[in-house]
Amino acid sequence: MSAYTDLSALGAAGEALISGRSADPQLGLDPATARAAAVLILFGVLDGRPADAGHAYAPADLDVLLVERSRRLGHHPGQIAFPGGGVDATDASVEAAALREAREETGLDPNGVEVLGTMPEVGVPVSGYRVTPVLAWWATTTPVAVVDRGESERVFRAPVSDLLDPARRVTAVVERGTHRHLSPAFLLGDEEDAGVVWGFTGMLLSGAFDRLGWTVPWDRTRRIPAPL
């Protein structure tokens, strides 16, 4: 089966990408103030940069769109995430909201994006959002770049084969007093400033790979401090 076929099947199934207690859409949220939001999980054909893991864990030209959030933001500063944000009253749907936010953050043309489906919303207590993941395929790619430095530090397309490489998969740990939070994480390169995908985005990405049947066994006991 092709990557597009696998992704289309996942989108049609609408399965939750996060399981367990973390999948509760009301987890730690105040129903009176929680706001609906959406993120765009956009896969497509790579823009000329091949995967460099040296292993064919996925087609070398398959990628996923990511942004590094501005360090000046109040929530999740500097973290690597899928494009997305709050659903506005003028948005016709959560899918429309995800596409609008992606256009505002990366400059992509929504007309070239095929929405494959939505997944059950997930609560993100730290930001007060109920987030709907929107799975999509980049049918006609367009150039992307940082649109607003107040929102994003960089916009880039990460090769899926690199993300699936077991050597680049770790568990990120956040210690706060007696509480410990663990999340799947992905090292984006060997350089110190290459970046780490972790937290909510890491959970969604890891869950998507699991449900797609793409995950390559990796050492979940290999841990790093979360790059807060």
Image (cartoon, rainbow, N blue to C red):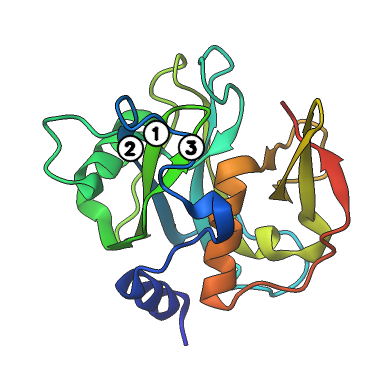
Between 30 and 63, the one nearer to me in the picture = 30
Choose top left, top right, bottom left or bottom right for residue 168.
Answer: bottom right
Q: Which residue is mark 3?
A: 124
Kind of residue sitting beneath label 3: Val
Q: Residues within 10 Å of mark 3 (few under 14, many from 20)?
A: many
Q: CA distance from mark 2 to mark 1?
A: 6 Å
Residue 153's place in the image compared with 132, above or below, is: above
Kind of residue sitting beneath label 1: Tyr
Badge 3 or badge 1: first in the primary sequence: 3
Callout 3–callout 2 Cβ contact below 8 Å: yes
The residue at 41%/69% (across/down) is 15
Between 185 and 165, the one nearer to me in the picture = 185
Residue 25's place in the image compared with 193, above or below, is: below
Q: Which mark is residue 129?
A: 1
Q: Which mark is residue 120?
A: none
Residue 112 point in image, percent of width and height: 25, 54
Callout 2–callout 1 Cβ contact below 8 Å: yes
The residue at 61%/49% (across/down) is 202
Identify the residue at the far bottom of this view. Answer: 1
Residue 106's place in the image compared with 57, above or below, is: above
Q: CA distance from mark 3 to mark 2?
A: 10 Å
The residue at 32%/24% (across/down) is 33
The answer to whether one can see residue 60 in this image is: yes
Badge 2 or badge 1: first in the primary sequence: 2
